[in-house]
Every structure is written in C-alpha cells, then in structure tokens.
Amino acid sequence: MTDIKEAIWKKAEERGTTIYIENRKKHLKDISESEDVVKIWNSYKEKYPYAKDIEFIAIINTLRNVLE
C-alpha cells in the first residue's frame, strides 16, 4: 500500500468513514457526474491561481489511481 493510500485509510478509520473508501467507485462516479461539484471546483480555480490549470477530471483520475 502506498503511503498516501495508507494515510487516507488511517484518517478514514479515525473518522469512521471507511465505508466511503470501500464504496469508492460509486462515490467517485457520483462526484465526477455532479455539476455542483464541478461548479465548486471551477470557482476554486478562479480564486487560487495555482489550481487554474488543474482539470476536475484529473483530480478524479488521481483519486481513482491512489485508491486502487
């Protein structure tokens, strides 16, 4: 297990939210299809210049890769 994946699992255990990681495919699909979340991300990108070139789908794909 990668360090980041291990850290995510540990934090989820502390919070009692491991069910979300266990069901990550469904939750990531729901998040990736949410127009509201995309709007929030686009607003964030406008506010923070360091995020301006990061596409929402890149975040979803990174999460998928890390959590596999």
Image (spheres, helix red, strand yellow):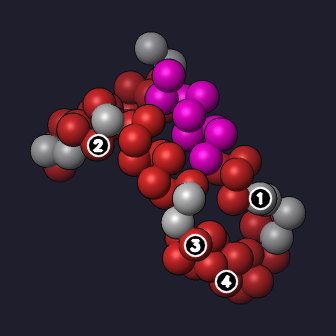
Q: Which residue is mark 2?
A: 20
Proximity of marks 3 and 4: CB atoms separated by less than 8 Å: no
Q: Position of residue 14 (x, y in %)?
A: 17, 43
Q: Can I make out residue 12 in this image? A: no
Q: Nearer the viewer, residue 36 or 54?
A: 36
Q: Which mark is residue 43?
A: 4
Q: Amino acid at mark 1?
A: Glu
Q: Compare marks 3 and 1 and give the one earlier in the sequence.
A: 3
Q: Amino acid at mark 2?
A: Tyr
Q: Position of residue 46 (x, y in %)?
A: 76, 83
Q: Which residue is mark 3?
A: 35
Q: Which residues are magenta?
A: 60-68
In the rendered image, the vertical position of residue 3 relative to residue 37, given as above or below? above
Helix, strand or loop at mark 2: helix
Which of the two marks, 3 or 2, is nearer to us in this view? 3
Within 10 Å of the Cα at label 1, are there few (<14), some (14-19), or many (20+) other Cα atoms? few
Report how far apart the C-alphas of labels 4 and 1 lie in the structure. Answer: 12 Å
Q: Is residue 61 magenta?
A: yes
Helix, strand or loop at mark 3: helix
Q: Is residue 36 magenta?
A: no
Report how far apart the C-alphas of labels 3 and 1 lie in the structure. Answer: 14 Å
In the rendered image, the vertical position of residue 68 relative to residue 17, given as above or below? above
Q: Compare marks 4 and 1 and give the one earlier in the sequence.
A: 4
Residue occupying the point 56% across, 59% down:
33
Residue occupying the point 50% across, 22% down:
68
Indicate the quadrant where residue 13 lies.
Answer: top left
**What number of labels is visible?**
4
